[in-house]
Amino acid sequence: MTRANKNPTERKAEFITAAEELFLEKGFENTSVDDIVARVGVAKGLFYYYFSSKEALMAALADRYLDEIDALIHKAMDEEGLTALQMLNKLSPSQVVISGRSREVMKLFHHERNQAFHLMMEERAQKILVPALERIVSKGCEEGIFHTEYPHETSVAMVAMFTALKRSVMVEDDPQRWNRFLAVSRELLERLLDARPGTFSEFLMNLPPKGECPKKLN
Amino acid sequence: MTRANKNPTERKAEFITAAEELFLEKGFENTSVDDIVARVGVAKGLFYYYFSSKEALMAALADRYLDEIDALIHKAMDEEGLTALQMLNKLSPSQVVISGRSREVMKLFHHERNQAFHLMMEERAQKILVPALERIVSKGCEEGIFHTEYPHETSVAMVAMFTALKRSVMVEDDPQRWNRFLAVSRELLERLLDARPGTFSEFLMNLPPKGECPKKLN
Amino acid sequence: MTRANKNPTERKAEFITAAEELFLEKGFENTSVDDIVARVGVAKGLFYYYFSSKEALMAALADRYLDEIDALIHKAMDEEGLTALQMLNKLSPSQVVISGRSREVMKLFHHERNQAFHLMMEERAQKILVPALERIVSKGCEEGIFHTEYPHETSVAMVAMFTALKRSVMVEDDPQRWNRFLAVSRELLERLLDARPGTFSEFLMNLPPKGECPKKLN
Amino acid sequence: MTRANKNPTERKAEFITAAEELFLEKGFENTSVDDIVARVGVAKGLFYYYFSSKEALMAALADRYLDEIDALIHKAMDEEGLTALQMLNKLSPSQVVISGRSREVMKLFHHERNQAFHLMMEERAQKILVPALERIVSKGCEEGIFHTEYPHETSVAMVAMFTALKRSVMVEDDPQRWNRFLAVSRELLERLLDARPGTFSEFLMNLPPKGECPKKLN
DNA sequence: GATGAATGAGAATTCATTCAT
DNA sequence: TATGAATGAATTCTCATTCAT
């Protein structure tokens, strides 16, 4: 009836956004194509005009997250003349993207149903984060501020550690725990990288205002 | 047609085993009750004679894993007069259980589908592992061999770290990487717990024979 | 295979009609959604495109009957300046609707299975018929042509009486019994309402042509 | 395990009683053979040793009710020298049996699910009650205390009337309504049978103590 | 008489996908 | 671009019934 004939790019984005909302609300496996088109307010057939399958939509959504991380990585790595420490600080917000984009989102992510999507995200994120981290760690070793023979494994460990800590902190909405999380993160980093005490005093600093949990990122 | 009338306990185990195999092959969400009964070679109704629902079977399978971990925890904690280090060594095989029970399993776990089940396992395992680890770490601090102000967070980080490392190592079948994994594990532990070099020279020792990847556990 | 893409309203009606036929043939509980779609000649999914559940279809069918009765009630009650007797005459065809819509239907209703549906219909019909009848009876008392202290109970009794009589008459296809039914009905009404002999000489008159059983109503 | 090897007749009765209870609790269609054997506390196979099918059990239960009514009928009809009025009084408790055996039972019968069973009972009861009533009515006409040209139809109407009235009264537990029911019943009887006022002053008298709803019958 | 494991035909419902318009 | 009716295979679960022991 109402034929808007929207811009294809916008329409596609509309689908992705609707899907994202629904995944968070109802869980990934519980969101049907019917739900998605209902939210967008269009007919079912249109979905298949834009996406070859439900999986394709899923991939597009994942890419949206990964693009954010990619941007952070390039921001951290591409600028000339940065030290390893400066790179690391620039990369640190990626943790928020990985774990979920806000407290609200996180709570929902924790809901059993979203795990499949969440894990997919984590794995894909790690695949691009770990190599970047590895290069930073290696660089830091050359600079003499980090010391390790295993930059790869240490990077893997770092990402996993932070993801787990973030997860355990964010389920509850306690600013105390968040402060503690910052302190713990810095200390564990120092230890893993065998860095001088105080090296990471600014790590995760640029994240949320002190004493508060992170809100939206964008 | 053919009526075997097996021992109920065995039958139940047969279902669980068939389900485990299928979950690994096809993924959890993609394994139907039909698949399971087909593999066991019985009629569909029998499944619901033994399990009230598909979820109940899943829970039974999860319990099978968790029971192993529980046993390890009790073995580590219940014996009188153990030092924190001895406890830790006894607890270390739990990592294998958490990450999956063998290389074969691991490869399959990687199949995108099993993530929901895998994540469920990891979460449940962490819920019982982390507190145990926390007690060991605290005890080690009292003994003066570990040093940290954050035993809880450090425990969370340790479990996550090992799980991730194990995962990244096991996907490929390289004995080299396995040795490297052992070395890395020990070093990271030393650093995280601020322990004397060499403290963990026997950590994960009792696991698989040197230079080999772990096979089945039992 | 063949895609007809019918008008939704027609399709919905097709389902309801098919269901009605099948309920009468096989009984309500014994009619499966499979049966219904087979009769309509469409795929199973289409059923759930139009009805949220089997119960919803049932409700839609019941409404079809109740709408007829509702129409009769309004026809009887809404017109200005009618006497109680005139109202009663206008309401009388409702009996046919309640007991089933034709001899054919009635025979089938007798098939043990349809009882659940039939009873549901009777109950719902009584819920709307009895109050209407009660008002008419009360009005007749005021007019001085009926006499009773119990308009409610008398109404209940009347509906039940007619339903039972209709049922016992209709199972067999005997015009004699039908004439007799008319005579009995009028006499019983006179007695129950303590009305003058001959008061109901036109009651049920407008129904089927004398000496014949009622066919379809519409 | 526990082999009681009960008396077959008792066992059969046990099944019927269990089924009756379950029908009232869960509804007829919702009671499975599994439920029944669980309540009796025996294995499933035993059910089929005593009853050839679920329907057979159902029939046996119905017979139990009908036997009660049969007994009442014979009590009313077989004694020598009774007047029609006396017979009618003796038959009156059958209403209670038809409508259900007690208030509790009645409430449950009203539950939507039991309708199939209830209606089956009503139909079967009417099949034996109506002829008995008809003979009484005819006899009363001969005696000159009743007057009607339609003893059969009047009997049908009477049974239906009472069943409906009873139903509408019993759902609520109001002694007022019960007294009213008695008064209404007597008046309607007088009118239907064109009997002298006061003829039925003792009708339904022998039922429950005045001013109370009926409890169990036996 | 009694057990309970095993059967298997169906039941209702869901949903990704297709396609005529 | 857009619609929405139509598809149909798959899924979970139920339950009366059978039969070896």
Image (cartoon, coloured by chain):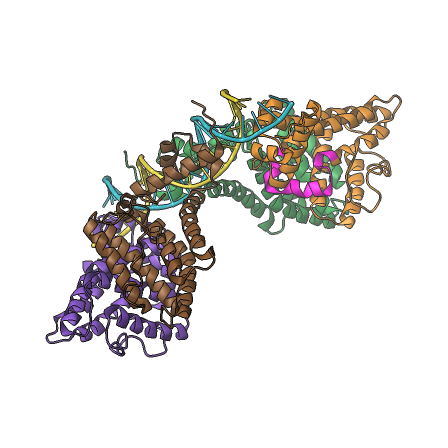
Chain colours: A purple, B brown, C green, D orange, E cyan, F yellow
Q: Percent x, y for residue C109?
A: 56, 30
Residue B31 lies in quadrant: top left
Q: Is residue D107 above or below residue A62?
A: above
Q: Percent x, y for residue A177?
A: 39, 72
Q: Quarter holding the N terminus of chain D?
A: top right
- Work out which residue is located at the far left of the displayed protein and give it: A80
- Magenta-tinted stretch: D97-118
Front residue (pair C164, C41): C41
**Residue at 26% across / 65% down in the picture?**
A158
Per the image, is A169 magenta? Answer: no
Q: Main secondary structure of the magenta part?
A: helix
Taking the image as shown, residue C184 lies to the left or right of residue D213, namely left
Front residue (pair B65, D39): B65
- Work out which residue is located at the far front of the displayed protein and give it: B81
Taking the image as shown, residue D80 lies to the left or right of residue C52, namely right
**Residue at 34% across / 79% down in the picture?**
A210
Q: Is residue C181 above or below residue B119?
A: above
Front residue (pair C180, B25): B25
**Residue at 60% across / 40% down in the picture?**
D26
Front residue (pair C106, D215): D215
Taking the image as shown, residue A59 lies to the left or right of residue C189, namely left
Q: Percent x, y for residue C60?
A: 48, 43
